[in-house]
Image: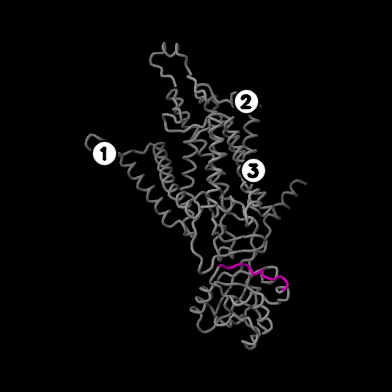
Amino acid sequence: MMVKLFFLLLMWVCSQVRGQEGILHVSNGSTFREYCLLYNSTWSNISDSLSRAESYPVQVLLSSQLCVRGQQGSLRGQAVVVERGGCEVSQKGLVAQDLDASVLLVSSVSDLESPSENGSEFRRLKIPVALVRHREVLDALQVFPRGMEVRLYAPPVPLFDASIVVMFLIAVVTVTTGGFWSGAAERLKQAAGPVCDSSDGRSDGGEVSLYSPLKVFLFVVMMCVMLVLMYFFYRWLVYVIIVIFCLASASALYNCLDSLMTALSCSTLSVSCRERSVSVRSLLLAAVCITLSVIWGVYRNDDRWIWILQDLLGIAFCLNFLKTISLSNFKICVILLSLLLLYDVFFVFITPFLTPNGESIMVQVALGPGAGGKGEGRVVRVPGDNSTSYERLPVVMRIPQFSALAQNLCMMQFSILGYGDIIIPGLLVAYCHRFDVWIGSSRRIYFLSCSVAYAVGLLLTFTVMLLSRMGQPALLYLVPCTLLTSAGLACVRKEFKRFWSGSGTYQVLEESRKPLLSDGDAGRGGGVRSC
């Protein structure tokens, strides 16, 4: 019975849905071009495949807005192209229908929106009505100067896209690799002996430890303030974030590559100059990392390929963050993850009731205020000829959707996952691996269990997203999965008290910052330095 239910669910997930982006197939003999068109699937019936779509000769009337019937003669059996403006799209459609046209294509230089001005007017339409970009109409006229025929079709879009699988693998591999790197660094630190921490939580090795609940709370408050500021002052602050990302990602990529080469025992190729040693490897790595960061900064708005470089820099940023920032004990993990869960849910689910356009602050900031695509209800917006490029925050992994042919023709569609959905649970995974090191667990039981819990939570996130066809705050599923799994394992192994408070010598002291050794012991220790 469970097997049958699984296959039924799988079939439903892989079923196809109708969108509002379509394809305008223009041809003349063996030559053809395909362009984006936008229509309202409620009022216009368009074929779902090119082979079943009817072919219509084209009548281009760019000098006419077709708002009054008396301006044109009969358009029987033709697909007529007119300019946008002068009257509503529904009025143009009714005039074209009265003139016996078979299709109405409205050429627009402004952003395309699926027609929805007047429902009662559209109900009277019997012909397909769609919007096309003006520049694409001009391109078709140049390619087919002796006439052309058009076919309209809207291939159904699978609800499940393979890009989700790629995103899942990227997130899981990044979290497990970052957690493993953090534990490996802790093992090296343990072999080198006790490391003292400064008053701000920074160790001699450069790692920063979060040990104070107050500091965690202030950190989350700062995140909330920053997100609200980004919502109101996005136009200016986005460039600050872009510059910070370029610097941070270049540094993170350098640390990742340098650590990888060190682990592979690659030579540093040091050169001595005036009694100073210069590492040729470090210089080459720095040059490569800075170059990649600059390339991303210059071409950051080119959706065709820049997502590859952004994801590479993003993975390096997340890995370096998980290795550099550490949580001192499970209590801090619970406080941080719980507060950020509330932060995520509030800014995704609650803020739509507080914003004037009904859009969540989190989505608006993550996608950018100028982002096209899905809007409220069934309205779809696609950038037109006069649309200016808008800046987006480089805080998400992006994978282009493979199966959305018509949507990608109109505007590239991406599956996205925020860095926070990788870093925040990843900090707990890293703590679990460090705890394995503290207790001498060769099987890494806490690390493996928390990594599996993260994968399960992410899989649950994507499943709910597909079933509801809505974006989900991933921390809503990731935080309970990882926290409950880690706490449950510690209880079963009867190590919860130690897991909660951290581990002996490497436990970072909280606000009191008391010395690990008494004054008397320190005096007898001679060479022992108290922290």
Question: Residue 271 bears which disc, if any?
Answer: 1
Q: Residue furthest bottom?
A: 73
The picture places residue 449, in percent across and down from the top left corner, at: 60, 34
Kindly report the distance in space between the C-alpha atoms of the residues bearing marks 2 and 1.
51 Å
Q: Which mark is residue 476?
A: 3
The quadrant holding residue 491 is: top right
The residue under the point 51% across, 33% down is 326
Structural crowding at the residue carrying mark 2, measured as other residues with C-alpha within 10 Å and reported as few (<14), some (14–19) or many (≥20)? some
Quadrant of the image containing the C terminus: top left
Whether 123 is among the magenta residues is no
Determine whether label 2 and label 3 are within 8 Å by CB: no
Q: Are marks 3 and 1 in contact (CB under 8 Å)?
A: no
Mark with earlier residue (2, 3):
3
Q: How many marks?
A: 3
Q: Residues within 10 Å of mark 3 (few under 14, many from 20)?
A: some
Could you tell me which residue is drawn at 43 percent across and 19 percent down?
530
Query: In the image, which is nearer the foreground, mark 3 or mark 1?
Result: 3
Mark positioned earlier in the residue sequence (3 or 1):
1
Q: Report the residue marked by disc 2.
A: 496
Q: Is residue 112 magenta?
A: yes
Secondary element at image label 1: strand
Q: Amino acid at mark 3?
A: Leu
Start and end of the magenta stretch? 111-120
Q: Amino acid at mark 1?
A: Val
